[in-house]
Structures are given as structure tokens and as C-alpha cells.
Image (cartoon, rainbow, N blue to C red):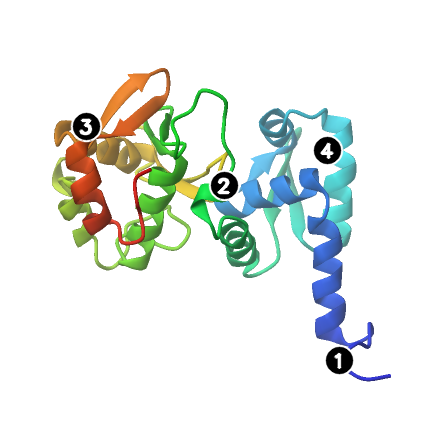
């Protein structure tokens, strides 16, 4: 049998095994949450996915057997984390492939055309994802979105004075899985500071609920700050 199609080939075997696990939406989403947002308890994952703990437990057991997640028991809690190196990059690449045509992306009833909105007190939707991606590419954030990168100058260009950001008891930065685009957007104190800066500069404006809209000023300025972002 040719090595190209030999299921016993280690690379072929690993890829097809991963594809089998990602084919289930519960396992896929659990892996995305663990890879992007970090460790979760079983109850936290179950609440986020909207499934029962026993049902999720069966999927997590399968992911553990596949070597994709690992678990640590702390007291009465079981804390799960992504175990496979580079898994977050693979999942992000798949999500970006799925949204290769932004206009073909998912829509929510009543949402703005490009699903620009907030998640708690930070930007989400396509604009939030674009901000996170630009910050990582420019070196302003680490790849996992949890720390400042070696060159945080883009924050200043976005209107954020890093010296004035006081996280208090909250995290400075977090990567939050966008529930529409299945890619990370920026949370934490820095995420709120970016949204505040955009509101102060009149680049976005609230339109009710959690939705925001890109203003005329934002339509002109944001594509310059965030190459590849085009307001709908």
C-alpha cells in the first residue's frame, strides 16, 4: 500500500484521528474553549455549551483517550485543559477557513449585518475578532491573548493609554471565544479599554442591547488600523 494512503502512517493516523474527534460539535466546541480560553471545570464547560454534565463527561473521556485533553483533580473539582501542542492554532485555522468569505458567515436574528456587538464590556463579533487578530499579528498581544506582547504600540494607535489601564482584580487580558465567529476576541481590562477608546473616538456607537455599529468615522479609520477589516 502506498504511504500516501496507508492508515498506519503516523502522520495520516494522527490527522484522521483528530478529524474524527472534531466531527462532533460538542467535542469541537469544548476543545475550542479549552484551547482559547484556558482550563475549565466540567461544570463551567457544561454551562458554556448548554449540555448536561454527564453528556459532556462522555465526550471529555473520549478526548482524554485521544490525548487531546488532560484533567487535574483539585479537591472536588476536575479541571480540564487542552493537552495537544498547537491545537489552538489548528482550530483557529479551521475557523478562519470556514469564514473565508466574511459575507457567508453566520448571522443572528436582529443583529447588525456584520455581527458587530459587545460581549459583557468588550468588543465581540467580526470587529472584536479583527482587533484581536491585529494585536497578535503586530506583537501587541501574545498568541494566547493573555499578556502584552513585545511591541504593544498598536494599543496606542487604537487610542488606549496602557499606563492608565488599571485591571484591579480582573485579568489584564483574556482570549474569549466569539460564539458567532468561533475565533478569539479580546476580553479583560484591555478589552474594555479598547471598546471605551472606540466609543470615545466615535468609531463605534451603541444601537441597543449588546449591538454596536461602526460609524462613518469608524468606516474610514478602522480599516486603516485593522488591515483586512471592512465594515458592512
Instruction: Determine whether label 3 and label 1 are within 8 Å by CB.
Output: no
Instruction: From the image, tell me which residue sits under label 1.
Output: 4
Q: Is residue 161 left or right of 194 when viewed as pictured? A: left
Instruction: From the image, tell me which residue sits under label 4.
Output: 56
Q: Which numbered disc flags the more N-terminal residue, 3 or 1?
A: 1
Instruction: From the image, tell me which residue sits under label 3.
Output: 199
Q: Residue at x 33, y 54 (%)?
A: 136
C-alpha distance separating marks 1 and 2: 34 Å
Q: How many marks?
A: 4
Q: Residue at x 70, y 73 (%)?
A: 11
Q: Position of residue 17 (x, y in %)?
A: 75, 60
Disc 1 crowd, CA 10 A, few/some/many (<14, 14-19, 20+): few
C-alpha distance separating marks 2 and 3: 25 Å
Q: Which numbered disc flags the more N-terminal residue, 3 or 4?
A: 4
Q: Residue furthest bottom?
A: 2
- Viewport quadrant of the C terminus: top left
C-alpha distance separating marks 3 and 1: 54 Å
- Above or below 198: residue 151: below
Quarter of the image for residue 27 reads: top right
- Above or below 96: residue 55: above
Tell me the element at label 2: loop
Q: Is residue 73 left or right of 175 when viewed as pictured? A: right
Disc 3 crowd, CA 10 A, few/some/many (<14, 14-19, 20+): some
Q: Position of residue 161 (x, y in %)?
A: 13, 40
Q: Residue furthest right?
A: 1
Disc 2 crowd, CA 10 A, few/some/many (<14, 14-19, 20+): some
> Mark 4 or 2, which is nearer the eye?
2
C-alpha distance separating marks 4 and 2: 27 Å
- Viewport quadrant of the N terminus: bottom right
Q: Which numbered disc flags the more N-terminal residue, 4 or 2?
A: 4
Amino acid at each position: 500500500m502506498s504511504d500516501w494512503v496507508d492508515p498506519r502512517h503516523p502522520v495520516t493516523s494522527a490527522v484522521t484521528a483528530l478529524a474524527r474527534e472534531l466531527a462532533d460539535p460538542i467535542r469541537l466546541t469544548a476543545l475550542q474553549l479549552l484551547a482559547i480560553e484556558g482550563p475549565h471545570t466540567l461544570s463551567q464547560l457544561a454551562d458554556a455549551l448548554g449540555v448536561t454534565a454527564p453528556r459532556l463527561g462522555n465526550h471529555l473521556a473520549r478526548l482524554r483517550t485521544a490525548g487531546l485533553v488532560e484533567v487535574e483533580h483539585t479537591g472536588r473539582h476536575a479541571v480540564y485543559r487542552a493537552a495537544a501542542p498547537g491545537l489552538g492554532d489548528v482550530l483557529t485555522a479551521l475557523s478562519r477557513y470556514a469564514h473565508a468569505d466574511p459575507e457567508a458567515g453566520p448571522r443572528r436574528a436582529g443583529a447588525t449585518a456584520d455581527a458587530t456587538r459587545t460581549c459583557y464590556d468588550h468588543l465581540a463579533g467580526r470587529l472584536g475578532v479583527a482587533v484581536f487578530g491585529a494585536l497578535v499579528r503586530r506583537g501587541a498581544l501574545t498568541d494566547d491573548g493573555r499578556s502584552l506582547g513585545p511591541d504593544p504600540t498598536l494599543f496606542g494607535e487604537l487610542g488606549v493609554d496602557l499606563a492608565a489601564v488599571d485591571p484591579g482584580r480582573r485579568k489584564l487580558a483574556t482570549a474569549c471565544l466569539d460564539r458567532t465567529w468561533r475565533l478569539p476576541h479580546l476580553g479583560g481590562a484591555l478589552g474594555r479599554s479598547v471598546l471605551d477608546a472606540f466609543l470615545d473616538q466615535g468609531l463605534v456607537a451603541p444601537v441597543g442591547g449588546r449591538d454596536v455599529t461602526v460609524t462613518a468615522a469608524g468606516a474610514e479609520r478602522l480599516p486603516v488600523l485593522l488591515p483586512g477589516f471592512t465594515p458592512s
